[in-house]
Image (cartoon, rainbow, N blue to C red):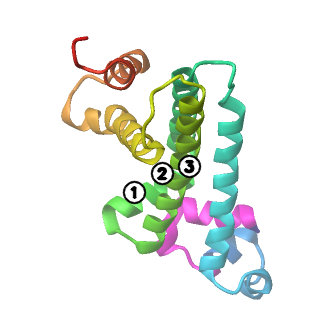
Amino acid sequence: MLGAAAQSFSLFGYKATTMEQVAKIANVGKGTIYTFFDTKEQLFDEILHGVISEMKTIIEREVDHRKPFFDNLFRVLDSLLEFRGEHELLIKLSQEVRDFGTPQSQEAMSRVEGVILGYMEKEVRFAVEQHEIRECDPSVVAFLMLKMYVALTSEWNKQHQETLTKAEIRQHFRLFLEEGLSVK
């Protein structure tokens, strides 16, 4: 039943998914769905919880504290971006946010971003404690890093014909965040 719900939300988005569609895809009566979930919101929340759990598994798999902070950061961000780009539900929710601004889709994407920011904050804090990077506000740095990464991987392509490679993105990250622009 959860698979059918995930399929429906992925195909139609939050706004257009109905409990009837989920029941039809699951090949069960609508009453069966309501036995387990009182509302579409509860069902959607369960699906989103699964997606967020998958993201956390990716983060745990990619982080190796024996490696430098920026290496971990790039591995995690690359893996999460790939996951987000291949996960049909996240693609559909992003489209729905862009096209309709559906509050539930906005909230879902905000929760997804929150998971990423939470990981990054924790890792920035760890890097400061390990003296890999200087003292800073981890929440501000995590926010800026994520926005810079999204800008270079997604937004850049909307304004420019050439796509930046992963190596170029890393080079700019290192320039701005690891080395800084000022001449020393």
Circle 2: residue type: Ile
| Along the viewing direction, whichever of 139 and 160 lies nearer the viewer | 139
Q: Is residue 16 left or right of residue 163?
A: right
Residue where numbered disc 1 is placed: 95
Name the residue located 65 percent from the left edge and 38 percent from the top edge.
Answer: 59
Mark with earlier residue (3, 1): 1
- Rendered position, 34 above or below 84: below
- The picture places residue 11, in percent across and down from the top left corner, at 53, 60
Query: Magenta span: helix, strand or loop, mainly?
Result: helix
Magenta-colored stretch includes residue 11: yes
Residue 76 in the image: state x and y as whole percent: 58, 32
Using a 10 Å C-alpha cutoff, classify the residue at mark 2 as few (fewer than 14 neighbours), some (14 to 19) or many (20 or more).
some
Residue 49 shown left or right of residue 68 in the figure: right
Whether tag 2 and tag 1 are in contact, CB under 8 A, the answer is yes
Q: Which mark is residue 13?
A: none
Magenta residues, start to end: 2-20
Residue 166 location, quadrant: top left
Crowding at label 3, few (<14), some or many (≥20) Cα neighbours within 10 Å?
Answer: some
Name the residue carrying label 3: 118
Location of mark 2 (residue): 91
Q: Is residue 80 magenta?
A: no
Mark 2 to mark 1: distance in Å? 6 Å
Residue 7, by quadrant, is bottom right
Q: What kind of residue is marked 3?
A: Gly
Earlier in the chain: of badge 3 and badge 2, it is 2
Mark 3 or mark 2, whichever is nearer to me:
3
Above or below: residue 137 compared with residue 184: below
Horizontal side of residue 21 vs 105, given as left or right = right
Report the side of 77 relative to 29 (left or right): left
Q: Is residue 86 visible?
A: no
Secondary structure under the numbered disc 3 in the rendered image: helix
Which residue is drawn at the image coordinates 70% and 87% (left, top)? 38
